Amino acid sequence: MVVQAQEGRLTTSRTRVLVATAVPAERDAVARALPGPGREVRLPGVTLHRAGESYDLLAAGVGPALAAASVSAALTAAALGGDPYGLVVSTGIAGGFAPAAPVGSLVLADEITAADLGAETADGFLPVTELGFGTVTHRPPESLVRETAAATGALTGVVLTVSTVTGTAARGAALRALHPRALAEAMEGFGVAEAAAAHGVPVLEIRAVSNPVGPRDRDAWRIGAALAALTTAFGKLTPVLESWNPHDR
């Protein structure tokens, strides 16, 4: 909540938060930590779950492109309606790089990085920035990252966005070699961050680790436990979001 001075008196204005997940199960896990039963709000191209006055939840779709399109549609509708969002949160489950981010842990991004946006060359991978255009990293507000980590106990580092989920030990090792601070990989954060940046809105990414990055073994995934961890995390996070000043970048 932001405190403002108007005509010699102090007033408060709420910060509206858009929470973007990939799939409804992740959205519902977050909703369990938020006030009230919620209601559906249908907009062109997207349907929001509204919780209380401050939170809109969006199952934005899988992958960075669909996530960016869905989040951009919600941001545009809010801005045109005269009640814009002050923050976008990308969240859900993720693969964690062992041993740094074990299954069941929470991971918070201080950098949201597109891991495979670029070109393969004879000398290895080149990010799109080294080709002379675009960006590959968005950085959430430092103050919000600090406060979120303190409230939730989340590990803080780089969260990678990939278009193909890692399925081999060799690919996992290659990603860590390119991104030594990487703690987790997911599929939507960079797309969400791109949409938020285009609208001038800060972004945060927090994930619950459901499986290790590496060989694809569905029997080792702990999706239910990760979703429960997501609910617990947002129960601790909401006071931070409600008191954070979006102008404090």
Image: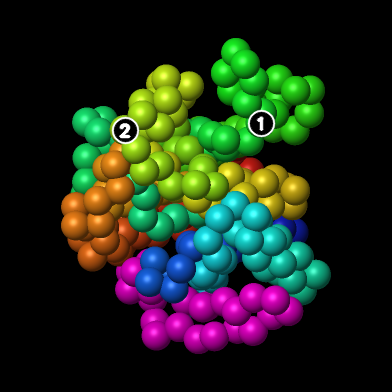
Q: Name the residue under label 2.
A: 169
Q: Give the Cα distance between marks 2 and 1.
A: 22 Å
Mark 1 burial class by Cα count in 10 Å: few <14, some 14-19, many 20+: some
Left or right: 218 in relation to 198: left
Q: Nearer the viewer, mark 2 or mark 1?
A: 2
Q: How many marks?
A: 2
Residue 44 is a magenta residue: yes
Q: Where on the picture, by quarter, is residue 69?
A: bottom right
Q: In the displayed structure, would residue 214 be above or below residue 12?
A: above
Residue that appears at 71% across and 20% down: 130
Q: Mark 1 points at which residue?
A: 118
Residue that appears at 55% across and 65% down: 61
- In the rendered structure, which amino acid carries the disc numbered 1? Gly
Residue that appears at 74% across and 59% down: 7
- In the rendered structure, which amino acid carries the disc numbered 2? Ala
Q: Nearer the viewer, residue 95 or 173?
A: 173
Residue 153 appearing in the image: no
Left or right: 185 in relation to 230: right
Mark 2 burial class by Cα count in 10 Å: few <14, some 14-19, many 20+: few
Q: Nearer the viewer, residue 168 or 235?
A: 168
Q: Which quadrant of the rendered structure holds the C terminus?
A: top right
Label 1: state its secondary structure: strand
| Disc assigned to residue 104 | none
Report the magenta residues as a range.
28-51
Residue that appears at 19% across and 52% down: 220
Residue 117 appearing in the image: yes
